[in-house]
Amino acid sequence: MEPVVPSCLPGIEVGSRLGVASLAGASQSLAAFERSKGKPVRPLTIPLLLVGLGLLAPPTAAAGQVSAVFRQGELGFPPGSTRCSIYEASFGNEELRDRLLAFGVDSIFRTFPDAVPADTFYSAGAGLGLRLVDRTRFVTIRVPDSNLVACLCDSLSGRPEVVFAQPVGVAETCDQRIPDDPLFNQQWALHNTGQSGGTPDVDVDAPEAWWILLGAGSPPVGVLENLIAPRQGVWATHPDFGSSVSGDISPPFSSHANEVVGAIAARTNNGVGIAGMNGGATIYFRSVQSAADPGDTDQAQLFDALLAQAIDDIVQHGTRLINCSFRLISTDFPFSGPRRSLILDAAISDAYKRSSLVVAAMGNGGLLRPWDYPAASGQGVLAVGSIGRTGSKSTFSQVGAHIDVVAPGKEVRCFREWCGWNHAVDHAHVG
């Protein structure tokens, strides 16, 4: 049988008469030599053939590795062994052994030597069981020449006996991009070096994220606020905003809204003020006036409808994230307990169906309030709790089974010194 040369190997014209004849002759000579030594006859490895023919220099590169999973019954190890030579392994199809030998593979070992089949079953309680990935089938294949790793992966991936094959690589620490904003060294929430008694690296790793993406080109972020009359806007002409803010931008301006927008999207690396988590993104801001009397059911329903319409408007402006730093209170005024609005839930659901996610604050009621809405509204909402500079929960931050993530929200640096507001939800935004 004429040997088959993988097309990704250099140095030989595949299909040429000279190449095939030379490979065939060399293969027959090696087979006779192996018989004389009492060894099992295997096809001559393609790399060794090419070296012998002078068509490929002897490998000088370091050895490489391939991670692979074979289908059930296609690869076996000797009893009690987690590592073996290519000749000791058993194959459901002997062509697989030949294929590996063609690349000079000399050994195979189990990637997870301690894994057992029982590990694939997990009891989730209440009589429920989960089937986990069977790690006993993960193997690592040693390739003497790392230059052949990609080619071997391509060769194996096309075979029906192989689930996947990919190169084994390494990981490296992300680089950082430190901005020149003069107040950035006070923004422990973005980059905690232990300043002011904080715990190093209790932060959102903003410099590492900025190394990958600095907000430019990302979809606009929507910010929805419920504000006290009269209706208030954002100071869109602030020198650290540039021209990134649109929507409700008429005075009077809301200090809380300015802090929220600044924490999310203040220009980063512009030599002015603070750095925004998603500095470079654009903001579409909407404010809705709270009902004058929470005990007035008609006003509360009108307010919910206004919130729903504002969410619709934000989504129509192409946003994918909608910041909500407010909570709904009940109509049993003055107790102000949690209140759920099916009107607002419907708007959140519709936004989610259109690929927009509401990012909502858990609330500032501490342990006395188990939940608040919209944070507890369910699907379509990312509920964010607050932590301080040491990593401990902020005393005011609410807890509950619906919480998704936590982020820095206590004593974070904003436009005006240290903000007293909870801005954890604002630091959950990244491009």
Image (cartoon, rainbow, N blue to C red):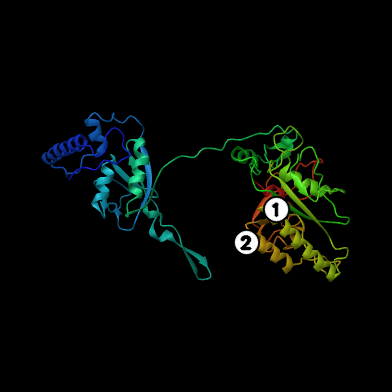
Query: Which residue position holds label 2?
Result: 353
Dot 1 and dot 2 residues touching (CB under 8 Å): no
Q: Mark 2 or mark 1, which is nearer the start of the sequence? A: 1
Figure quadrant of residue 290: bottom right
Instruction: Say whether residue 106 is visible.
Output: yes
Residue drawn 63% across the image and 62% down it? 379
**Does residue 34 lie above or below 156 as drawn?**
above
* Lateral position of residue 128 relative to residue 204, left or right: left
Residue 333: x and y in percent read 85, 68
Residue 174: x and y in percent read 56, 38
140 or 77: nearer the viewer: 140
Tag 1's secondary structure? loop
Residue drawn 87% across the image and 48% down it? 251
Figure quadrant of residue 226: bottom right
Residue 260: x and y in percent read 76, 48
Query: Which residue position holds label 1?
Result: 317
* Lateral position of residue 125 relative to residue 96, left or right: right
